[in-house]
Amino acid sequence: MIAIVDYGAGNLTSVKRALDYLEIESFITADPGELLSAERIIFPGVGHAASAMRILNQRGLHTALKEAFNSGIPIMGICLGTQIILSHSDEGGTGCVGLIEGNCPKFCLKDKRLKIPHMGWDSIKVVKEHPVLKSVKPEDEFYFVHSYYPQPSDRESVLAECEYETVFPAVIGRSSLVATQFHPEKSGPAGLRILEAFSTWDGLDGLTC
């Protein structure tokens, strides 16, 4: 059973619908205890880093996510959930959850034809093999919508990259954690394959500290 973290940050129902389509059992919860008893956790999100962290702290979910990570429960971050698993975000100068050391800077683009946010379909390049990314093909495209992007301090945490003038991490991971800047639940068959792979991943083949 997969627990979907409810911290008032959008796209919860779209993640739930995608899992329902795949016939993967899941539930949405804001209860820290339910997170810690789940087999796996999806940490989604759309919104502002500072607002999200405030709600996470108010609900005790910040601590629960750390405990779940330390106990080896497989966790998948999505979009904002990917950004705020890092230690800091430039969005609001926000201290974040800190499961992976790093920062989230905002795109600073020289090409004025490119818009911020980076929004729409784009391909990714897998740079490190990972069980959750085993189905990704070179021609696959995924749906992005973001103005900030994850930048782990340790290059070993980068699993896949995307280019939007700047080459940025599109998937990061460490130990039992994997996190996508794109939205797999909105990325058609390619995204569904990633969610399906996560649903059977035991977290043991991820990157260590």
Image: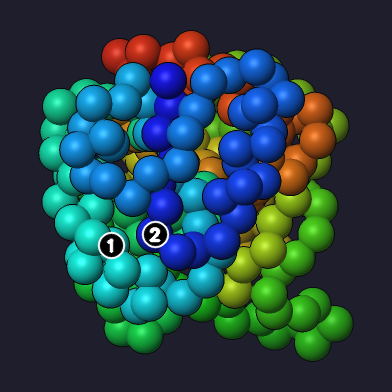
Q: Foreground: 83 or 71? A: 71
Q: Picture coordinates of residue 105 (x, y %)?
A: 44, 74
Answer above or below: position of 186 versus 36. below
Mark 1 and 2 residues: CB-CB less than 8 Å, in contact? Answer: yes
- Horizontal placement of 70 versus 95: left or right? left
Quadrant of the snapshot with the C terminus: top left
Between discs 1 and 2, the one toward the N terminus: 2
Kindly identify which numbered label has been placed on residue 56.
1
Q: Is residue 71 left or right of residue 52?
A: left
Q: Nearer the viewer, residue 193 or 165?
A: 193
The residue singled out by tag 2 in the image is: 7
Q: Amino acid at mark 1?
A: Leu
Q: Is residue 155 above or below residue 68?
A: below
Label 1, label 2: how many angstroms apart (C-alpha)?
A: 6 Å
User: Label 2 sits on what residue type?
Assistant: Tyr
Where disc 1 sits, the SS reads helix
Q: Please, is residue 72 above or below residue 162 in the view?
A: above
Task: State whether residue 201 is above or below residue 59.
Answer: above
User: Residue 150: in sight, yes or no?
Assistant: no
Residue in front for this viewpoint, 192 or 5: 5
182 left or right of 95 in image = right
Residue 96 image-quadrant placement? bottom left
The way the protein has been coloured in the rendering is rainbow
